[in-house]
Every structure is written in structure tokens, then in C-alpha cells.
């Protein structure tokens, strides 16, 4: 049985053409997780590609929930992760809130929809949903420092730059910009 939390969030304007649409948030299911793992970004954004062997069950832990985001036709257009699942470092125990009633968010939009002026409305919808569901005092997110396209969107959504977090990888270090805003 599909559990749907239908929270339409209409944001004006949706994109640079002023088109409005609704986003529908629902708890991520395994089929959604598998679809997201299969998404492929190109160029410098390929770093966001999941590995084929990634376990979708990690995305289904409700203690640090992922939500599927669908459009009016029911198509999966993206996802939001709230809590420790959005950290760029590991977490011992999944959880939603961190210090000062802060929720860390992570998000992804289907690759064919990126770069089309939908980002700000998508981010605002995810923040609106989290405000309604979780009542945080602050939001925090992390963006790769070279992803200026995303950073511009986050700044337009009210986030401010806080500092750099270095993620250590065998393939090389990755610098993430920490950004915060009041809820």
C-alpha cells in the first residue's frame, strides 16, 4: 500500500517563464530509490551519480527520511533528504535534528530537469515541506564548492555561506560549502 503525503506546494514563479506547478512529497519507496540510483548526471555533475551497487535500503530509513518529489502527472522529478542522511560525513545513528533544532537537507533533481530554471522553486518547495512537517529553527546544506549553479540557487533561497568542509576520498578530497538559513 502506498502511503502518500500529498502536500502541494505552489511557488510563484516556478521558473524564469513564471510558470507555476505543484510538487507532491511522499515517503520514498524502494522503486523510487532504485530510479534515483539509476539517474546519470554528466560532466562535472557526474560526481552526484550513485553507484549501481548502492543499497537503496539506506534511503528508506524513516529516522532520517528521504521524500520523493512528483509533479502533477505523478512523475518522479526529484528527492529531498532530511537529517543525517544529508550529511557529507558519516553518522553513527540516523537522526533528523542536529544542534539548535537544525535540519540538514540534501536534494536531487532528475538530470534532464537540471539547468532549466526550476531549481529555486524546487528548493523553496522542499523548505516549505520541511517547515510544515518538522518545524525546524534552521536549515543547513552542503554544496560542492565548484557547483556555482546550485550555490546561486541556494543563495537566492536565502542560504548564506558559512565555511568549507573537506570530505576525504581515496579518489581525492572534495570541498563542500556549508550554507545555512533560518527556517
Image (cartoon, rainbow, N blue to C red):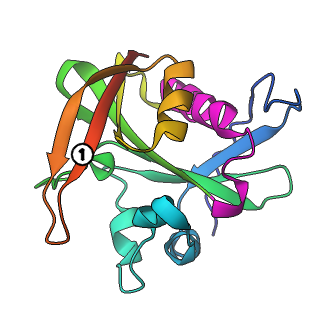
Q: Residue at x 21, y 34 (%)?
A: 164
Q: Is residue 35 visible?
A: yes
For the record, the magenta segment spans 110-132
Which residue, as the protein is rendered here, is positioned at the far bottom?
53
Q: Is residue 96 visible?
A: no
Label 1: which residue? 175
Q: Residue at x 66, y 51 (%)?
A: 114
Looking at the image, residue 161 sits to the left or right of residue 156; the answer is: left
Residue 102 percent location from the top left of the image: 29, 25
Is 111 one of the magenta-colored residues?
A: yes
Is 25 one of the magenta-colored residues?
A: no
Is residue 101 placed above or below 73 in the rendered structure? above
Residue closest to the eye, 96 or 173: 173
Residue 79 percent location from the top left of the image: 55, 53
Residue closest to the eye, 38 or 24: 38
Is residue 110 placed above or below 53 in the rendered structure? above
Residue 106 percent location from the top left of the image: 42, 45
Q: Residue at x 28, y 42 (%)?
A: 176
Is residue 76 placed above or below 95 in the rendered structure? below
Residue closest to the eye, 123 or 101: 123
Amino acid at each position: 500500500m502506498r502511503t502518500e503525503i500529498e502536500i502541494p506546494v505552489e511557488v510563484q514563479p516556478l521558473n524564469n517563464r513564471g510558470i507555476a506547478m505543484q510538487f507532491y512529497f511522499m515517503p520514498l519507496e524502494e522503486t523510487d530509490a532504485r530510479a534515483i540510483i539509476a539517474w546519470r548526471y554528466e560532466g562535472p555533475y557526474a560526481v552526484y551519480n550513485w553507484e549501481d551497487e548502492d543499497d537503496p535500503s539506506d534511503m528508506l530509513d524513516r529516522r532520517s527520511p528521504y521524500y520523493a518529489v512528483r509533479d502533477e502527472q505523478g512523475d518522479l522529478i526529484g528527492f529531498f533528504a532530511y537529517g543525517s542522511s544529508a550529511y557529507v560525513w558519516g553518522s553513527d545513528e540516523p537522526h533528523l535534528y542536529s544542534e539548535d533544532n537544525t535540519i540538514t537537507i540534501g536534494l536531487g533533481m532528475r538530470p534532464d530537469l537540471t539547468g532549466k530554471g526550476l531549481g529555486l522553486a524546487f528548493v523553496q518547495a522542499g523548505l516549505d515541506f520541511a517547515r510544515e512537517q518538522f518545524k525546524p529553527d534552521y536549515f543547513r546544506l552542503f554544496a560542492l564548492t565548484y557547483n556555482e549553479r546550485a550555490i546561486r540557487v541556494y543563495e537566492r533561497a536565502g542560504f548564506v555561506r558559512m565555511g568549507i568542509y573537506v570530505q576525504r576520498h581515496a579518489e581525492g578530497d572534495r570541498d563542500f560549502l556549508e550554507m545555512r538559513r533560518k527556517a
